Each structure stands twice: as C-alpha cells, then as structure tokens.
Image (spheres, rainbow, N blue to C red):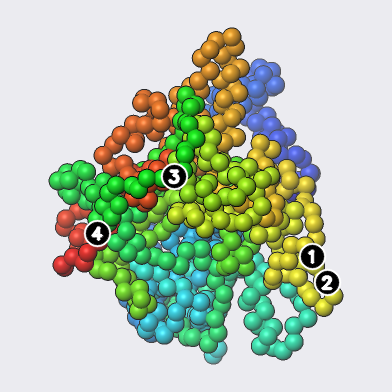
Amino acid sequence: FGGLSEIELLNALLGAPKIEGPELVQETFRKTNPPGDFQTAWSRFLHDGFASHVQPHDQPSSFNGNAVAPQIQDLWALPPAPKPESPEIVLTASYEMDDGRYANNGWLQELPDPITRLTWDNAALMSPAFAKALEVSTGDLVQITITEKSAAPEPIKRELVIAALVSPGHADNSITIPLGWARKMPQFYELPYAGADLKERAKIEEQSGFNGYFLRTAANPHFTVAGGQGIDSVRVTRVGRTYPFSIMQEHFSIEGRGLIREATLEGYRANNDFAKKIPGEEELPHPPPSIYTHPPLTAPQQWGMSIDLNVCTGCSACVIACQAENNIPVVGKLQVSHGRIMHWLRIDRYYASRKRFEQDRGAWPENPELVHQPMPCQHCENAPCETVCPVNATVHSEDGLNVMAYNRCVGTRYCSNNCPYKVRRFNFFDYNQRPVGKRKVVGAFNIYEEYFAPLTTKGAPDTIKMQKNPNVTVRMRGVMEKCTYCVQRIEEAKIAAIARAGASSNKRIPRDSFTTACAQACPTEAIVFGDIKDPESRVSKMKEQDRNYRILEYLNVVPRTSYLARIRNPNPKMPDAKDIGVASLVETLPE
C-alpha cells in the first residue's frame, strides 16, 4: 500500500536516498566489517540471529546520586488526595486501541471491554458513589476542566466533554479515561446539519469515543490531580445531555444461580465436591423422560471442551481468534445496541458480593468481586435447538457436534429462542457483502445511521475478501450461525489422519494433535479441546477433576462443554478477604 517501515521513515527524515528496508539493514551490517565473504556472513547472521564478530563496547559508567536527588524527591512527593469537588483524572492506554494505533481495526472496535462490556467507545469510568455525588448515570455527558498553574493573566484550561460510565469497584473521587479513541468519520463535514447545538451533537455522535489526549500534559502524562505538578484545579460538571452507548452486557448479577462456581482454598479443602452441590441444582434431580430419539454417536472419537475458570483472565483473545477463524463479520455500533453482535464466543462478566444485589431498585454494588466466564456453544447431546428446527438445519453429527447446514436454514430463529445458553447468532443483514459504515444517498434519505441492507452499496474491498478463511462458509442474510467447535479443523485433521494411515485401518486422529482457534489463542490455556472418549487426552483428564461441572445441568441437555470451578486463595489478613470467593453463595451471609 505504499507505506514505509520505521527504519525507512527514519532514513527519509535523515535526508538519505530512498533505500528499501532490507538494504538499509544490510548496509549497517556491512559497516561492521564481517570476516570472509559478505553474503556468507550475512546468511550466517540471519541464521544465528547475532553477529559473533561484533564485540560489545565496554564503557565505564558512574552514578552521581546527588545530581538526581531533587528529581527522586519529586517522584516520592505525594499529591493531595482527590476530593469529590476536585477528583483525580487517570489517563490509561485503552485495552482495545492501546494508544490509538489499532483504531482502524473493526474487530477491536467491536470487542467488548472485559469489565465494562462497552463496544465502539471509551468513557469516563467512575465509581457508583462518585457518580451519585455528581448526580450522573451511565451515558450522561460531563465536562472535565483542568486549569494549569500559570503566571499569565489567563490560565491555560484543558477541557473535554465525555460520557460517564458507572463501574462498580472503581476508586472513589477518581475518573479513568482510556486513551486512543475519538477517530471522526471523514464524511462528517459533508452532512447538512443546521444550528449550532445540532452541529455539536452531530460531532459527538459521529465520532468513535472521546479524545482523552486533550487532558494530557508533559508534566502529568498519566495522573492529574489538583495541587499536582503545574495543576491548579480539576472540575467535573454535568452537561445536561446523554450519549448513546452500545454495551453488550447490561446484566451484572448471577442472582444465586450456579453459573459460576468458586470457593476459597480453605473451603475447597473442606468440601472438594462443592462444584457439584450448588443449591438450586437439585430442582430436577431426575430428568424427565424424553420422546426425542437421539441419533447414535457411533464415531470412534467424540469431541468436547473444558474451560478452567481458575486461569481464565477474561482477556478476550479467544473472541478475536474465533472471529478471525470463522469469518464472523463486524456489525457496527448501532447493531450492537440492538443486540445483534455476531461473536460466536462471548465472555460473560458478573459481579459477586456477600450481600444480595438490590437490582430491582437499581442499586450498584460498591466494591464487588468480578468473575469472567467464556460462553461458546455447549454442543448439547440433547440439544433443544435441534428439536424445534422445522427444516433440520441444525443437526447432530456422529462425533457429537451440534452442526449447522446453512443452505437449509430459513431463518425462523426458533433454535435461538429455545437455546438456554443464548449462543446462537442471526444474520439480520448481509454484513459480508454490504459492510457496515458505507454511506449512500437514496432520494431524501442518507442511509448511514440505520442499516438498510438492500439499499446500501454491495461489495467489499479485495483486501477484506482475502482475509476470509477459505475453509469456512461465509454466511449471508437470514441465516443462523454459531460455534462449530472449529469443524473445519476437525475435518482437516481427519483428512491428514487418513492420508497418513494409507492401507492401515487405524485412521484415528492422534491425541491432542490439533485444537480449536479459541484454545490455540488462549494465553493461559484455560480452554482445552479434544477427544472425550480417550481417557488419556487432556480434556478427559480435566473433566475427571472434582472441580468439573456443567452449566444448567438440571435441564438434561447434556452439554459437551464443561467448566472447572474457580479456587481463590486470599490472604486472610486482607481487609476484604471475606468478600473473595463468594460467587457461588446464594443466601445473604452475615458480616
């Protein structure tokens, strides 16, 4: 695309002749005077990864502590404590955008934040108590004004209008703003808005997030508080307008259900079978008989998954890996707000506390425990989605997978309604042929904010088409889809096993020789996939642990995906030790 690498850009800034990056590196290597033939030495350098003939430069170093003593004292000097009328402003790198370098990546724009579950935006994060003091709620716009100390008659003021988002567990009298957002739409200035107020609202609504860099100074790149270095005052005021957020998960309480099960190490040692004895699970101790005849699972290898909540960090790497592997489209902020996000794998986030949440009265927990739970398709053996599909578009394979026949699907969405785990996704529009974000004028209508698939321009850039996985069907409008346990990888492993077997009758896939995209991307190996009929496979050994349990097991859907309960080990001397490891508690406990 005509871009420059870092060293090519530096070379251009130095005014040197234009040279390709590899040649620049070779010229630098040539100046080290490699022994013998240059090409041989260059090949050896590439192979070894270092140049053995280059000796390190030994330079004597000295340290003068007195020279830096004032700077060290300044670092240790504590700024004044933040107050409700003068809060602390914390500027941090965005979890999705970093410092803004990934702002053009639709996958990351639509990735829900692990804690707030916010997509397509950043926000001014604050605690429930501080939000109550400001008389603001999630979505309310606030203006942050930072006044710098100055000898000039007019002090320098830095201002930012940003939407607030209440986040339980956040520090009081403090506002956190992730950086790297606020890329504006290039077509904004072409829109025929009238009136200053309407223009201001349009400017806010057309951008993606808010630019926290407006509040950043060289002396205070990360933290700003009144009385700090060069800061006179920090003020936060209500604007009186709201901003539309697209938050994937509004619900935050488990409400006593055994979805996530955890215990302290002490409690686990006293009752190592706690994961299988959660109150409420005995509601249906004997599953009722079913008139549904299950197809025989005759394949010699049966696939399943286990997810260890003990090591899951909620990082969402599995979500992006699944999206890349399975050609999952980006739907845009508006469609996310309509509940039409297409991720096959979601990370559910819940807050847990020793006290019951007063959700009916809108009360937020002040300092709860936060827990994550990956939620893919459970691949139930008694799948309720299969029994309601009128055209057999979702069926069971002989190796235990709940699979989709896309060309049969007529879009009744009965399967989605009947899924107790809510893991099915419906293509309301043809996202792959008509990507979200294209603008088209049809008569008096400017089709941008709403997504009218038949009227928007058809076609996607070739670069987007090249990104698609050729082994996975690209779905279109009106088709239901969901996690397939990466069936394309299973079939690829089967073909490779048959090719290796030749005339032999042993065509089994070698143990743990492949895995799903989510398991491959997981940095903590919390997700394990494999053959559950092989007692020596990793997934079988995980399912044999006493921490293993299945969600909504009393429904008798027999999910192939199971979870390992989380074990917490807080230091008993911590002030909040008694509030850790309580996600499985049902009744209110005494203080």
Instruction: Pinpoint residue 497: horizontal percent, then vertical percent.
Output: 56, 20
Q: For this rendering, which residue is in front, 539 or 257?
A: 257
- Circle on res. 442: 2
Residue ID at (73%, 73%)? 188
Q: Are marks 3 and 2 in contact (CB under 8 Å)?
A: no
Amino acid type of the residue tagged 2 in the rendering: Val
Drawn side of residue 244 relative to residue 429, left or right: left
Q: Residue at x 66, y 36 (%)?
A: 471
| Cα–Cα span, label 1 and label 2 | 8 Å
- C-alpha separation, residue under disc 3 versus residue under disc 2: 53 Å
Give the number of the disc on residue 455: 1
- Residue identified by numbered label 3: 291
Residue behind mark 4: 585
Label 2 or label 4, whichever comes before in sequence order:
2
Q: Position of residue 537 (x, y in %)?
A: 39, 27
Local secondary structure at mark 3? loop
Task: Give the mark toward the camera: 3 or 2.
Answer: 3
Q: Earlier in the sequence, mark 3 or mark 2?
A: 3
Question: Which mark sits nearer the N-terminus, 3 or 1?
Answer: 3
SS at mark 2?
A: strand
Q: Position of residue 350 (x, y in %)?
A: 37, 60
Q: Residues within 10 Å of mark 1 (few under 14, many from 20)?
A: few
